[in-house]
Amino acid sequence: MIYWNAGLAERLACSEEEKATLPFLIRDLLAIASKVQQEGVQSVQNESLVVKNDLLSFGFRLLSEGLAVEAFEEILAIFLITGSKSGFEFLKQCIFAETLLSIASGDAIDVTLRKLAPYCGVEKASSLLAILEEENLPRQS
């Protein structure tokens, strides 16, 4: 889990229109996380979302190396803190990092969804959680 401070939180500022696209991004990330659970990390290396994003590409490369979760979390935190992105691009980077950490921790898809949903804001998070019922995502026992 990403631990926030005031500096990181300030860099998250973006418009409501940008935030409105997050449920679609999160749905794509959940599909990737599900594929990793079923087929392994190598199965997503060529996914367009992974290939297009440096953080996802780098993160999946580290995951495939079997890096310990604690070390992986530190590396992702450094990536976020030292990066120059802000606004919506930074928000997406945080969501990517949270997804990668959830995969590394072996979280069930419904747990990953619950970690990602708050990035959308309170109102959208509730509707995003309804995806569990709509798509019958695997639930943690």
Image: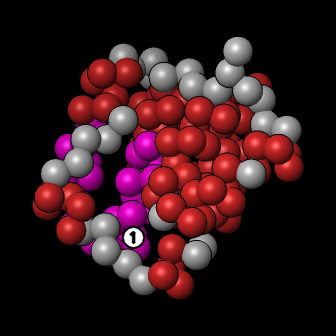
The N terminus - image quarter = top left
Whether residue 74 is visible to the viewer of this picture, yes or no, is yes
Locate residue 13, reporting x and y percent: 31, 74
Residue at which label 1 appears: 89
Q: Confirm whether the magenta stretch covers residue 134.
A: no
Q: Is residue 49 visible?
A: no
* x and y percentages locating residue 94 in the rendered image: 38, 54
Chain part drawn in magenta: 75-99
The kind of secondary structure the magenta stretch mainly shows is helix
The amino acid type, in three-letter code, at marker 1 is Glu
Report the residue at 21% width, 58% height from top. Answer: 8
Residue 126 vs 38, above or below: the answer is: below
Name the element at disc 1.
helix
- Look at 52% across and 48% down and name the residue there: 116
Residue 90 sits in which quadrant? bottom left
The verdict on residue 84 being magenta is: yes
Which sits in the foreground, 65 or 107?
107
- Left or right of 25? Residue 75 is left
User: Dividing the image into 4 quarters, which one contains the C terminus?
Assistant: top right
Where is residue 72? Give x, y as percent. Answer: 33, 29
Along the horizontal axis of the image, is 49 left or right of 65?
right
